[in-house]
Image: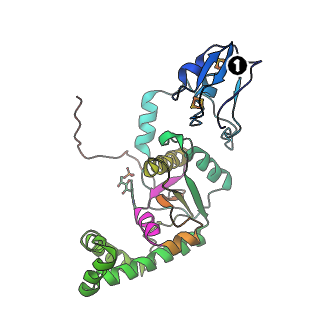
Amino acid sequence: MTGPIIDKDKCTLCRKCVDICPKEILSIKNNEIVIVHDDCILCSHCYCVCKFNAIQFNELKQPVFSFGHTAVIKDEIKPFDIISFIHSRRSVRRFKADPVNTEMLHDLIEAAVLAPSASNCQRWQFVVINGREKVLMLAEDIKNFFIKLNTIAGNPILRYLSVIFAGKKILQYYKNNYESVKLGLERAKEGKDLLFHGAPCVIIVHSDMEGSMPVEDGQYAAYNIALVAHSMGLGTCFIGYASATLNSAPSLKEKLHIPEHNRVHAVLALGYPQVEFVKNALRKDYDVKIV
Ligand SMILES: Cc1cc2nc3c(=O)[nH]c(=O)nc-3n(C[C@H](O)[C@H](O)[C@H](O)COP(=O)(O)O)c2cc1C
Ligand code: SF4
Ligand code: SF4
């Protein structure tokens, strides 16, 4: 059975774990904490409220960063600091060639898995492509995929024939992406890396589709990477074209050790920014109704 292991000698029966458990798994009976059913989602809330270190898990580990462990922050962070920090993250589309050290990469993945996930399923998996040459190899594979796709989409007969085999996706692609991809492929001939923007590193977040909200889970993990990278002086850019390609090309997934039935949720270009932003982002007006 998975779940918390209670050290009866340390437990003071303070009830904090009982009260916080979202699944009502813990109870006090005969002066000890008992587990009343086995639906534990391993969220570790009980562990996090126990002041007496009476709770452990065999299945869980403490995330370890290059600087050691994180601590609970109570009053030190001012709300506006966080907003300013989030606001100053930008998509970086010009990277220096400098490599990202493996300690930092490790920290980014540890930070990724701090994201929330539906029912705490944490099914995310990661591929880190570390090194400019390897990134360029992936860029080349993706470019070749789009050359083939544009050859089909750009030919009216092939385009309509492909509807029979692949549904209307190709028509949507022709309408929404064909021209910009065509332009991108032309510019790529000049040697520009329009896909990964010169990044020395790429992080792919993927998972199987077993959880109840796998896409959201993966994307929250990816956004953690983007924010934490920003805090380290690194830049990131979500590369939607790369995610879409990997999800349509099983042979590319195989090359990257991504199981065929897994879905890629995010592909992030990563590296040191070669651009300095002196102002924060502008945004469109939006609709909000507070009801
Ligand atoms: C799902 C998703 C896919 C994206 N795909 C790309 C991409 O393929 N290439 C790129 O240069 N930027 C991509 N971006 C970055 C957006 O263009 C960028 O977030 C947006 O313009 C706002 O700019 P900011 O991130 O600097 O605030 C993507 C962003 C998201 C959220
Ligand atoms: S929070 Fe810790 S000390 Fe309190 S009842 Fe639970 S296990 Fe015991
Ligand atoms: S890990 Fe979460 S679900 Fe499991 S017993 Fe603790 S609080 Fe409850």
Can you give x and y, in whole percent of width and height, for residue 45 in the image? Answer: 58, 28
Q: How many marks?
A: 1
Q: Which residue is mark 1?
A: 52
* 29 to 71, vertically: above or below: above
- Give yes or no for residue 248 being in the magenta stretch: yes
Residue 228 visible, this orientation: yes
Q: Amino acid at mark 1?
A: Phe
The quadrant where ligand 3 appears is top right
Can you give x and y, in whole percent of width and height, for residue 161 in the image? Answer: 28, 83
- Residue in view at x 56 percent, y 37 percent: 41
Can you give x and y, in whole percent of width and height, for residue 199 in the image? Answer: 52, 64
- Which sits in the foreground, 231 or 286? 286
- In this image, 176 relative to 138: left or right? left
- Residue in view at x 68 percent, y 36 percent: 69
* Residue at mark 1: C-beta within 8 A of ligand 2: yes
Which segment did they paint magenta?
Answer: 233-249
- Which sits in the foreground, 172 or 226? 172
